[in-house]
Amino acid sequence: MSRVRLAVRRPWRLAAEVTALLVAAVVAFPLYWMVLGALRPAGEIESTEPRPWTASPTLDSFRRVFEQHDFGRYFVNSLVVAGSVVLASALIAFLAATAVTRFRFRFRTTLLIMFLVAQMVPVEALTIPLFFLMRNFGLLNTLGSLILPHIAFSLPFAVWMLRGFVRAVPESLEEAAYLDGASRARFLWRILLPLVLPGLVATSVFSFISAWNDFLFAKSFIISDTSQSTLPMALLVFYKPDEPDWGGVMAASTVMTVPVLVFFVLVQRRLVSGLGGAVKD
């Protein structure tokens, strides 16, 4: 009987695996085409008959990217912005999620609804008000004008997601820690934080990608001081309306993608458990 069931299930499993491979191929194809465009010589890039391979790969496009003035500074600026957003949003979201889950206070539900409503507002609708706000605070042409908005936009999602992880930690565990003499701060950092760490990693990935790939805020808030620009702005150097350097664009995009892939590799295990769900009693 079990053999019959296994035989019935195998076609469905095979179909699921084939579908997964097709979806993965569709998702990976733009990345492959980007790397291929970065390795192609100029003649093949401008050809009217593009081919999904190149017979003479070259690193000239990457050479132009790294020889570009201030490209290294743009790279460091992006790391500073993305790293600051990840650390600050993770810390604030963890404390806020703990507060709205473990404590009862007035307007707690209203605060959670405000978090949800803030997540629904399009970023484009707030760019102009944020511009005037940054101008009044004297933050234009600084990395702070990129860090603060991204922290604000990443917090609602992070708080809502971490709230489920904090709620899933049994209250009996907290009571046992207090009976053993642990203070509230020690329980928070030594017990609760390691348990919700997968959720922190999952939210940090979204915060990192959002800050790393940001073009709208970088274009709107960094006006005259190009030394404060980030990597997405560096792509404009290679894109000229009359004669765009598509090889340079693809090479710079490939360089931008590498830190994201490294970040994924470093956190992939905790990311899977974080997306899978919180701890259970």
Image: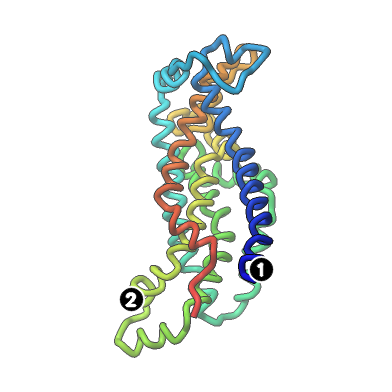
In the image: residue 280, left or right of residue 156: left
- Which secondary structure lies at badge 2? helix
Crowding near the residue tagged with mark 2, few <14, some 14–19, many ≥20 C-alpha atoms within 10 Å: some
The residue positioned 47% from the left and 82% from the top of the image is 170
Residue 57, compared with residue 10, is above or below; it is above
Image quadrant holding the N terminus, namely bottom right
Q: Amino acid at mark 2?
A: Arg
Return the residue found at the far left.
181
Q: Name the front one of labels 2 and 1.
A: 2
Q: Specify whether residue 138 is in view.
A: no
Q: Residue at x 40, y 22 (%)?
A: 66
Task: Give the quarter of the image for residue 105.
Answer: bottom right
Tag 1: residue type?
A: Ile
Residue in front for this viewpoint, 24 or 74: 24
Q: Which residue is mark 2?
A: 186
Q: Residue furthest bottom?
A: 179
Say whether disc 2 or disc 1 marks the residue closer to the N-terminus.
1
Image colouring: rainbow
**Disc 1 marks which residue?**
113
At horizontal 49% and vertical 36% (from top left) the residue drawn is 257
Q: Is residue 207 left or right of residue 195?
A: right
Measured from the top left, where is residue 17 in percent x and y? Answer: 61, 50
